[in-house]
Amino acid sequence: MKLTGAEIVVECLKEQGVDTVFGYPGGTILNIYDALYKHSDEIRHILTSHEQGASHAADGYARATGKVGVCLATSGPGATNLVTGIATAQMDSVPVVAITANVAVDLLGRDTFQEVDIAGVVMPVTKHSFIVKDVAKLADTLRRAFRIAQEGRPGPVLVDITKDVTAAETEYVPQKPSPILPKVNTIKEEDIEKALELIRASRRPYIFVGGGVSISGASQELREFVEKVDAPVADTLMGKGAFPGEDPRYTGMVGMHGTKTSNLGITKCDLLIAVGARFSDRVTGNTRRFARDAKILHIDVDAAEINKNIKSDASIVGDARAVLRILNERLDRQTHPEWVKEIQAMKEKYPLTYDHDILSGPYVIETLYRITGGDAIICTDVGQHQMWAAQFYRYKEPRTFISSGGLGTMGYGLGASIGAKTGKPDKLVFNIAGDGCFRMNMNEIATATRYDIPVIEIVINNHVLGMVRQWQTLFYGHRYSATVLQDKVDFVKVAEAMGAKGIRVTKKEEVEPAIREAIDAGCPVVIDVQIDCDDKVFPMVAPGGAIEEAFTQEDLDAKKAK
């Protein structure tokens, strides 16, 4: 049957099982929006307040569901407004397909109104980008885009379509997508044998979990592997929930704001088994001193990550779930009672602490965990509140912690929470934000109220850019350059003005009632929690320091007292 390019876009989305798209229309993409209008009973379109919100919503939808997130934008500024969200998805390996429209083919390269070479712009921050100038190639290009986004290490793909292509007609033949199979052809027998040899020889193994475990759906296999190796477990920010935070073997996050137990334990181990982690700088600290007495076994689907940041002694390239299944089949149960006992003693000696006498970010997060029982989806923006959410909420399942890890995108969380709630409507969804982050994309509250998406925004409001202020306090002589946000913005009134419920919290005893009221409200809610401007995230590793040098406020006070 003959269809227009715009109709082919919609049919290809239906082929791929897409039920929701996020976007913002404009002149060049109007044909696609007209086609979507005719299929609104099959594909839900969520009009965000800004294109960046659409890209973050598609990202949050993908992270929460494991499916491909889709966002749409028009040419020029519409397309460029997606770039930050696309880069966020690329850094955290999130399958997103961004569809943009451009000026007609005969107007390309002529500085036409709202013309941008968006395929070229996003080339460094996508798995692939396309521009479609021939309607006959449109369907196959879109199908390729969805496959590329999901295969191997997932990531974002952009498809730019010229306006004349969306209007032109061609023959369309429906096609059922072939299944996306895990990457297993790179798993080599000699690599498996080497890994088993290292595990059997180890006396102090540590398992280090990254986001690749959640992406591959390997959580159950990981739990079995941990039991077989008999080792403690640490994770990255992206690895949250891949291994249950309530498990006695779990020691917390590793790195700049990781627990002392994880940081010291990894420094003392003789074998570090990294599964689906990329050894980012925020994890390793000083790479020359990272796990310096340990053999490194690195399991990752992306061969480019092997030896990129940390040199490994053995590696297995392939899907984490497939690799762990093989190892579990061949590995006899190991026992390391003394090592496990030593790590448990560290956990008791170095617990995460905070001042329980004041209203603080950690208190809010712990209260939220207690009320939800760890069964909510927690999204975050970026900063101190993000680290507190990682430290003090215990994630039991994968895809329940949604945060910008690699790019550190302020303003990410609200759009992502809208996407997550859209994809998982039966789950409670919270976004933990700082006041600085909330200012960036607070307009998406209007999106939540427009569609009655009951996300709960908890703003940890310290009236400063908290994490930057923390660095200025510790490393810049208390020179608070451009980080003080004391002004007259009232977040409760802002929320109410956009149709949401607003609640202000200024005392500890108000936290629990506020959260319960927000849950019961069944509508978008903003909780403005006022905390002190100088609360800090501890432990912390100084830039360039080794992770074993993690310090707390108590350590700083003891050092001053000497």
Image (cartoon, grey):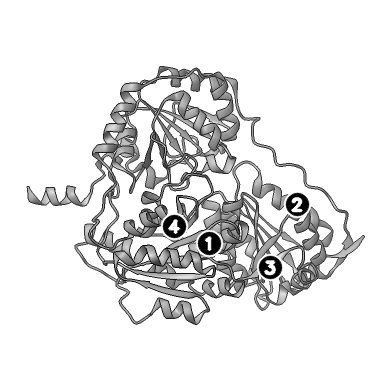
SS for callout 1:
helix
Check whether the beta carbons of the residues at disc 1 and disc 3 lie within 8 A of each other.
no
Circle 2: is it few (<14), some (14-19), or many (20+) Cα within 10 Å?
some
Measure the C-alpha gap from mark 3 to mark 2.
20 Å
Disc 4 marks a residue whose amino acid type is Gly
Measure the C-alpha gap from mark 4 to mark 2.
30 Å
Which residue corresponds to mark 4? Answer: 408
Q: How many marks?
A: 4
Measure the C-alpha gap from mark 4 to mark 1.
16 Å
Measure the C-alpha gap from mark 2 to mark 1.
27 Å
Disc 1 marks a residue whose amino acid type is Ser
Q: Could you tell me if residue 382 is visible in this image?
A: yes
Disc 3 marks a residue whose amino acid type is His
Q: Is residue 295 above or below residue 504?
A: above
Quarter-of-image position of residue 293? top left
Which residue corresponds to mark 3? Answer: 45
SS for callout 4:
loop
Quarter-of-image position of residue 319? top right
Question: In the rendered view, does 166 fall on the left or right side of 90?
Answer: right
Marker disc for residue 417: 1
Question: In the rendered view, does 335 fall on the left or right side of 13?
Answer: left
